[in-house]
Image: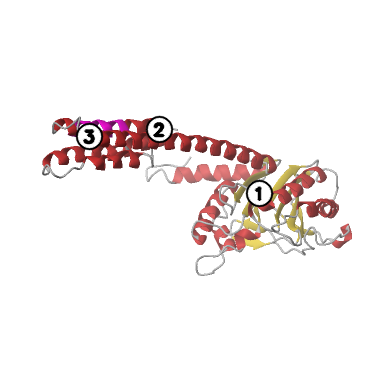
Amino acid sequence: MRQPWQSSHALLVIPVALIVVITVVDQLVPADIHLGPLLVVAPAITVSFAGPWLTGLVGLLAVGAQAYIGWHFGVLFSRNVVVQVLALAVLSALAVFYCVVRERRRRQLEQVRAVAEAAQHVLLWPLPERIGPLTIACLYLAAEDEAQIGGDLYAATATGSGVRVMIGDVRGKGLAAIGEAALIIGAFREAAHRHPTLPELAVSLEESVARNLPHLESPDDPGERFATVLLAEIPDDDNITRILSCGHPPPLLLRPSSAVTIPVHPAAPLGIQGPQPADYTLDVFSFEPGDTLLLYTDGVIEARDAGGQFFPFADCAAQWAGSSPEELLHHIRRDLLAHVGGRLNDDAALIALSRAPEPHQREHRHRRGLHAGRLVHGPGATSR
């Protein structure tokens, strides 16, 4: 609240300076030239940046300046000056009334925005920074103005033996796709704890989508309803990670010296057909301590610059392979928005998961860091 108030006070110099300049110049020009009517510019300008109180104050100063000009020339009670003063007072009052209406609508808009943000946070819970041995960071960039979520979705939950993560993308984008995303997120949160394997979990999600997605079809956007989803299962005590793709882009595995796209055998997206567990292929890879796994939606890899070039996602991520998940997503967000010129045409979501190093690895790195610290203290340092 302090910043807009300070900005209004700084800009207040402009209308006050105009009042002073017009008043002074009106007394210096020939008597047949009247600049007093120009004082109406001051409250008119103030409306653009100030509230009703400051606008009323400037309007009062303008009326006082108009009266002073009339008094200075000895014509304060002449019909012409009286009409000018009254007209300036009426216009200033109208400016104040406009400010009151605008401030009321602004408060209403802020309340609606606060409710919308709360609803969006309920639909898309922020992921915890840590689940078991995993450090997690997430990033969501909505294409719709004033929206925090859209057609992309993600969720993560701890099971008895590890962590299950989902990232997906429903057909469409922006606010129209929020209902479909919320449906899949809710189905995952419940089914992730009930099914022992990812294929069975995928079948459960497919059944939920088949039952409910048709009811969410918008008259303005008819057509087939479907969603791509990637499921990952990361055990707590095993480096073998399992993933299942329902038409979703494969994840990216970052290691200190490389960025590798994990090969997947994608099945049909949710909502296309009713497959059985045997129809899904479970892909397996090694997710070692110190590695970072990047899950993303097609809004990231299909982002284009002004020349139509796709965002070099893998190359960008590889540059920051040694960063923490939060720092990694910070760098990717900066580079992505710079590539597209600050605005995305599609929703984009990313999840970065890093497995903590083994205790002996952390101890080794800590000792190595202490030893390196001694070496950079200066030529006079001695080893012990």
For the residues marked 1 and 3, what is the alpha-carbon distance in whole angstroms? 78 Å
Viewer-nearest residue: 86 or 44 = 86
For the residues marked 1 and 2, what is the alpha-carbon distance in whole angstroms? 50 Å
- Find numbered disc 2 in the image and state the secondary structure of the residue it sits on: helix
Q: Earlier in the sequence, mark 1 or mark 2?
A: 2
Residue 100: x and y in percent read 45, 34
Task: Give the dominant element type of the magenta stretch: helix, strand or loop.
Answer: helix
Q: How is the image coloured?
A: secondary structure
- For the magenta stretch, what is the residue range? 59-69
Viewer-nearest residue: 261 or 199 = 199
Q: Which amino acid type is shown beneath numbered disc 1?
A: Leu
Badge 2: residue crowd in 10 Å (few <14, some 14–19, many ≥20): many
Residue 145: x and y in percent read 56, 50
Q: Label 1, on which residue? A: 353
Residue 289: x and y in percent read 67, 49
Q: Label 2, on which residue? A: 52
- Whether residues under marks 2 and 3 lie with C-beta atoms below 8 angstroms apart, the answer is no
For the residues marked 2 and 3, what is the alpha-carbon distance in whole angstroms? 30 Å
Q: Label 3, on which residue? A: 79
Image check: 122 left or right of 146?
A: right
Residue 196 in sight: yes
User: Which residue is rendered at x = 27% and y = 35% of the image?
Assistant: 83
Q: Which amino acid type is shown beneath numbered disc 2?
A: Pro
Asked which quadrant contains residue 134, the reply is top right
From what the image shows, is residue 152 above or below residue 189?
below
